[in-house]
Amino acid sequence: MSDYIPVFFTLVFAAVIVAVMVSLNRILGPRTEANAIKDAVFECGNEPTGTAWGVRFAIKFYLVALLFIVFDVEVVFMYPWAVIFRELGWFGFVEMMVFMGILVVGYMYAWRKGALEWR
Amino acid sequence: MEEFSLSVAAFYFMAGLTLLGAGGVVFTENIVYSALSLMVSFFGVAGLYIFLNADFVAGVQVLVYVGGVLVLTLFAVMLTHQIAEIEVSNKSVGRVPALLICGGLFLVIAKALRGAEFFTTPGGQVSESSTYGIGNLLLREYILPFELASVVLLAVLVGAVVLSRKEVIAPDGTPVPERETIPLTEGQRVMSSPRAALAGAAAKQKVSDV
Amino acid sequence: MSLWAIGAVKSLLVLVFVLQLSAFLLWIERKGSALIQNRIGANRANIFGVVPFNLGFLNTLVADPIKMFTKEDFIPAGCDRFLHALAPFMALFPALITFAAIPFGDSIVLGGETVELRVVDLDVGLLYILAMVSMGVYGAVIAGWASNNRWALLGSIRGSAQMISYELAMGLALVSVVLSYGTLDMQDMVHAQGRTVLGFLPAWGVFFQPVAFIIIFVAGMAESKRVPFDIPEAESELIAGYFTEYSGGKQASFMLADFAEVVVVAGLVTTLFFGGWQFPWLAADGFHLPLMGTIEVSALVVTLLQLMAFSLKVLFFCWLQILVRWTVPRFRYDQLMDLGWKGMLPIALANVVFTAALILARGEGS
């Protein structure tokens, strides 16, 4: 467990430094009176109407996140393989090629279906 | 002895973090706060993995769950219309069936835990790196599940692509393409490719000159 | 007791290194951009005109922080106040602690105890870095959401989609690096780069994995969201992107997070591809120069030279990133996503297959 003592210190020190940075303005900064115009969010000078929560975005962003998870899990599977690769030899190579091949098929499918197209 | 008690304290801290986060997911009313509490819970679990000397699994926990799955969840929250004001609690089923189901699940897990054998190594030290062991198990003994995982991932991929494509079915049953190509006006063509447009204009001028 | 002291000193040292370098890079960026754009840059700082030369760097190291931290802590109405404060924390915190896994020197003997010159002594150091980099998404996402501003929200969603896309290319390129070193431990990787090939060339990773180097460097720049990839904060379309509604110390946190990521990318590239703390031809007992024989050097000098080599390499890659930032224009969003998904992802995948086949073809496998 002693390996993790420096980790503990890093986490604590970093948290304190960042917390001080974020909250220092509360102590040092001036406090002025609020009014409706000052309190408004800045949207290029247009008068903001309503809330931005619930503004709808293209489903593409969600698709990107989904594709990311699929390939991220694939990459995670590849790390242990890469570490013991020299012991596995050609056997491990073929194993990973099958694994990758199946996902490359999916990648080609996504490409052909236009899922990677940004229109 | 000092080391030992410290690690016990750290264990309880991590376990507390996990439970606190899980509680936050259930009890907060704002769904963004729920998602962020889930992150706290994930970190607690990652910490517990470190206690089990499974540093690879801990890294993967943060990488996949915090860096991937939770981002997806946050995207879903942000992309959904007016989700901030929706009452998320499901009132149609009621508490008694919920208690029954959760209690049953708890009993199953408790039974499995009681029946499980826990391996402890002397001194709490595992000699070889966990990445190495995982790789050996995954690529030698459990090769079939490993390859099947890629099929599962493929299914996810295909499902994601199919679901997110907007295919509107016309009244006669033929699918309508996602966006019809609208012919560009002269001005737009110039905007999109000035050089080509200039070349076209030059060619036209030549024709008119003749 | 000494274990605790050493841990505290090491972690504080690295944190201060990253923070100071980030702050200093701010000044270097101002002067560098001025140099590139043929203007003078920050040149007004002086102490009441007493000092005969200009103290430009005081601008960013002293005057800027004072100005920033004495601003009003302003939160627009309709913002989520807690998340508004949490977002800069989530942006800067992971960026600061990422550097902990990067070794900045060989292990030294200090008062009879061996001290590893890196903070986190992890077997899975590379995975730790990747995990912490993936945490950087949250700063952007939470900031955009908490601001309750349409442009900020758009910037944060763009930014997070961009970051996860490039994280993928980075992760895949790292697989080929792991393949050629056969370990996830970054200290082992640096040790492996200590030998020479062909008798004179230091065995730096870049000579074995040039494609991975380019992908990781570019993806790293995209992760830090600086100019060729600064779509999330494209000022001509999105005001300032996800930190539009931030001022003072919170805005400084976002800015420092950007520069801390620059430092982290520089450290990562240095460690994986340019020998880390290895000084060319310098072993533990002295220089082993090709053709000229051995020059013996004491252990203290070796350690100092290694620390210097590491710092200089990191500085060089920071400077290179600033150079790129002021040279290349911004991508369009579809070009950006195309580069990530259709360009770097398949290339990285092909690189993995090629590396694996090459290792086996050379008979290194059993």
Image: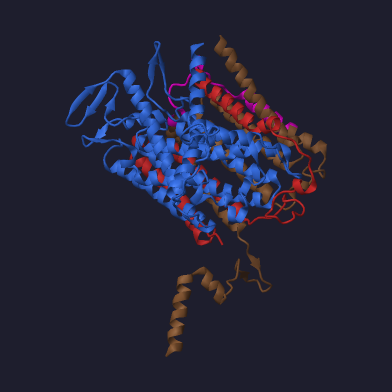
The chain that appears red in the image is A
Chain that appears blue:
C
Is residue A20 visible in this depiction of the protein? yes
Instruction: Assign the C terminus of chain C to one quadrant of the image.
Output: top left
Q: Residue at x 36, y 35 (%)?
A: C181
Q: Residue at x 22, y 23 (%)?
A: C295
Q: Which chain is brown?
A: B
Residue C180 in the image: state x and y as whole percent: 35, 38
Position in image of residue C94 (x %, y %): 56, 34
Q: Is residue C188 above or below residue A72?
A: above
Q: Is residue C322 left or right of residue B178?
A: left
View extreme (bottom): residue: B210
Q: Which residues are magenta?
A: B103-132
Nearest the eye: A94 or B90: B90
> Is C163 colored magenta in this rendering?
no
The structure residue drawn at horizontal position 68% and vertical position 31%, both measured from the top left corner, is A28
Q: Nearer the viewer, residue C364 or B31?
A: B31
Report whether C213 appears left or right of B165.
left
